[in-house]
Image (spheres, rainbow, N blue to C red):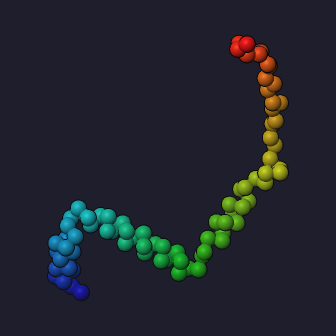
Amino acid sequence: MGPTELLIVLAIVVLLFGATRLPALGKALGDTMKAFRDSSKGDSGKDKIESDKKDVVRIEDAQVERDEPKKLEDKGSDKA
């Protein structure tokens, strides 16, 4: 396609969608292309999951300070 055809296509797109919606459409198209590219690489996020597992501290291994429960004093009620 030459420059003339590209200008015609661009003019039609602007007429159809309006100049205000073009940035949102471009962002949505870019996000879709990125997601497709990531999924086509075969990387299903296993590396990220493995690195996240290394960062997680096991609950049993975590040091927790335990406070003694506060004891309530029975002051009695004012009602007789």
Residue at image position (61%, 70%) is 45
Residue at image position (69%, 63%) is 51
Q: Quadrant of residue 47?
A: bottom right
Where residue 58 appears, x then y in whole percent?
78, 54
Q: Quadrant of the N terminus?
A: bottom left
Could you tell me if residue 49 is visible in this image? yes
Viewer-proximal residue, 72 or 33? 72
Viewer-proximal residue, 18 or 74? 74
Residue at image position (60%, 75%) is 44
Where residue 54 appears, x then y in whole percent?
73, 59
| Name of the residue lying farthest toward the front | 80
Q: Is residue 54 above or below residue 17?
A: above
Count of numbered tags: 0
Q: Is residue 62 above or below residue 2?
A: above
Residue at image position (59%, 80%) is 42
Q: Is residue 77 above or below residue 10?
A: above
The answer to whether residue 60 is left or right of residue 23 is right
| Name of the residue lying farthest toward the bottom | 1
The answer to whether residue 54 is left or right of residue 35 is right
The answer to whether residue 52 is left or right of residue 42 is right
Q: Is residue 79 above or below residue 71?
A: above
Where residue 7 appears, x then y in whole percent?
18, 77
